[in-house]
Image: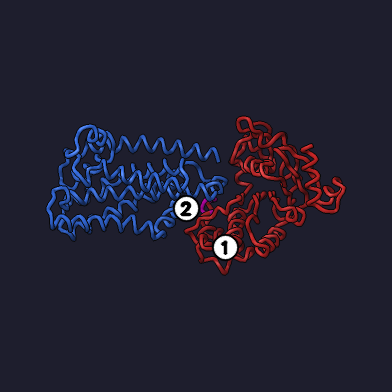
Amino acid sequence: MNAIKIEALTKKYRDVTAVDGLSLCIEEGELFSLLGVNGAGKTTTIKMLSCLTKPTEGDAYLCGKSICREGTEVKKLIAVSPQETAVAPGLNVRENLELICGAHGFSKEKQNTKIKELTELLGLDSVSRKKAGKLSGGWQRRLSIAMALISEPKILFLDEPTLGLDVLARSDLWDIIRSLKGKVTIILTTHYMEEAEELSDRIAIMKDGKLLVCDTAEGIKAQAGTDSFEEAFIRIVKGAAK
Amino acid sequence: MRMLTLAKRNTKEILRDPLNLAFGLGFPLVLILLLSAIQANIPVELFEIERLAPGVSVFGLSFMTLFSATLISKDRGSSLLQRLYTTPLTPTDFILGYTLPIIPISVAQCIICYIAAIILGLDITVNILYATLFIIPVSVLYIALGLLCGSVLNDKQVGGICGALLTNLSAWVSGIWFDLELVGGVFKRIAYALPFVHAVELERAALSGNFGDILLHLLWVLGYAAVILVLAVLLFLRQMKRQ
């Protein structure tokens, strides 16, 4: 079953076309990566799918709900972990999670259950009383993902989740993302080739707002005629420029 | 209830910042003590505690503008607002969530100013209660200015515009630190066309029990507060749409 169905989605800012006629389907429980260089249209695509910006043309359906006509319903199904960590720096870890529970109108009982579950899942117990603003980048990312997961989304958008993290913090976060596979549909945007290859069921490569290819990492390598995913990415993106 | 969650969070963010406490509560207290000390040595009518305390309690509100604007601009910059926009919180929840928590903080600041003034010789009368109540519409004016600035400026610009320009503007044209009659002319006319001097005169009238003078100044304050609040809400909604 399709979790997301995108139909000719287009976003124009005056004379710039950020996303140009994007069409694709993402299966329920799939971990789908959007890959591309800067300005490829990855973040704009996520912003449209999460109802933060309206498409100029086209539409997308999340669990059958239109992003153009049923924004409120779509918001109940999704969660976003933005590029920036997007945490409240003066609140501690637990209070940040309580903020999101409150924004979703959870009862006290449900709030406590969800916070316990997510602090365990993301290993946040040891820092639950620390102010978010004092945490390292890796811990802030974990908190950011916990804040996104707390509303029990059917679809989770992770926008550059490992940007600026060291190797160990990135590896820890990969483990967390792997543990979510199959439980929730994940749309991941990233600059890192190895991240997309390692984690994704399928990968879409975008350039200048257009979809160049959408396949498994193996399929993309086969299409480009190379064993290296990075090389395949370069060939496809450069090939599109010629 | 959802709005209260955001309001609670905003209260914590403001009160947990030691700089906010130092400037919001400490600075007005220092001003009252310092100017009262000057008044004790060189008596100046303007710095008599009955006139000084209402002025300082209004001037202290310019820090509320700074707190409100800084909080919103930082939330925009860190994408926390973007995250919250994907939750069921409504535009009304956001506006009230950023506005309401600063009103009790403003009232608390005003009460602390008047307690300091009582220690320095201000007579305890029921008028102090009225003056404290009339700080509420004035605080809405200053909070709306913060909402407006926070919706259009980044946190560095907020520091410059609200932290420096607005605090200076509200100091110069409010008649707190010097008598506007002494300057007169265009400066005085500009000052009286702005809400700051009316806010101070409103507080002074309430504290002195000149209730006949209150209405005119209150209308000026409420008029400006309404216009700025509407503008602030429109600009906040515009940046919300842009996100």
Q: Is residue A25 left or right of residue A166?
A: right
Range covered by the magenta-colored residues: A100-104
For the C terminus of chain A, the quadrant is top right
Which residue is located at x 86 percent, y 50 percent?
A: A226
Disc ID at residue A136: 1
B100 or A17, which lies in front?
A: A17
Badge 1: chain ID? A
Which residue type does callout 2 highlight? Answer: Thr
Q: Which chain is red?
A: A
The answer as to whether the residues below labels 1 and 2 share one chain is: no
**Picture quarter with the N terminus of chain A:** top right
The reply to whether the magenta stretch includes residue B144 is: no
- Looking at this view, is B29 or A235 the one in front? A235
In the image, is A115 to the left or to the right of B130? right
Q: Nearer the viewer, mark 1 or mark 2?
A: 1
Q: Position of residue B4 (x, y in %)?
A: 44, 51
Q: Which mark is residue B5?
A: 2
Residue A77 in sight from this viewpoint? yes
Q: Horizontal and vertical percent for residue A46?
A: 65, 44
Task: From the image, give the main secondary structure of the stretch colored magenta.
Answer: helix
Q: Position of residue B188 (x, y in %)?
A: 22, 35
Task: For chain B, give the colour.
Answer: blue
Q: In this rendering, does residue A94 appear at all?
A: no
Residue for point 71% across, 55% down: A183
Cα–Cα span, label 1 and label 2 = 26 Å
Amino acid at dot 1: Ser
Position of B92 with respect to B167 (left or right) is right
